[in-house]
């Protein structure tokens, strides 16, 4: 897997995680959903002819989700103080 492919996958999976969080899910839940979908696809690829499925896509999604979690500023999850 080339570096360009890893960055392209990271962009796609990070975008999915970001869209799921905009939809109202927490970053951890959005990351778990994305990683489980990718892992399910990898398992399904084991029965397809050709190269076997890899878990690297799920691992990239977990890494991107961890980075998104660390980069959160906390304003979206904490309620605003009453004035």
Image: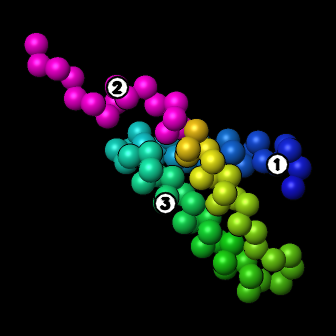
Q: Could you tell me residue 44's position as x and y percent? A: 67, 79
Residue at the location (42% across, 54% down)?
29
Q: Which residue is mark 2?
A: 75
Mark closer to the observer (2, 1): 2
Please check the rendered image and state whether residue 80 is part of the magenta-colored stretch, yes or no.
yes
Q: Which residue is mark 3?
A: 33
For residue 20, say whether it is visible: yes
Earlier residue among tags 2 and 1: 1
Q: What is the CA distance from the residue labelled 3 to the residue labelled 1?
A: 21 Å
Asked if the residues shown at circle 2 and circle 1 are in contact, with their CB atoms under 8 angstroms apart, the answer is no
Asked if the residues shown at circle 3 and circle 2 are in contact, with their CB atoms under 8 angstroms apart, the answer is no
* Colouring: rainbow
Q: Secondary structure at mark 2?
A: loop
Please check the rendered image and state whether residue 28 is part of the magenta-colored stretch, yes or no.
no
Q: Which residues are magenta?
A: 68-83
Vertical placement of residue 77 versus 45, above or below: above
Q: What is the CA distance from the residue labelled 3 to the residue labelled 2?
A: 23 Å
- What secondary structure characterizes most of the magenta part? loop
Q: What is the CA distance from the residue labelled 2 to the residue labelled 1?
A: 33 Å
Q: Which residue is mark 1?
A: 5
């Amino acid at each position: 897997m080339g570096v360009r492919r890893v960055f392209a996958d990271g962009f796609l999976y990070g975008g999915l995680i970001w869209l799921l969080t905009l939809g109202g899910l927490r970053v951890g839940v959005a990351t778990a959903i994305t990683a489980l979908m990718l892992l399910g696809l990898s398992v399904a690829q084991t029965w397809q002819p050709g190269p076997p499925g890899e878990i690297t896509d799920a691992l990239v999604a977990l890494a991107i989700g961890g980075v998104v979690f660390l980069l959160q500023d906390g304003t979206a999850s904490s309620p605003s103080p009453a004035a």
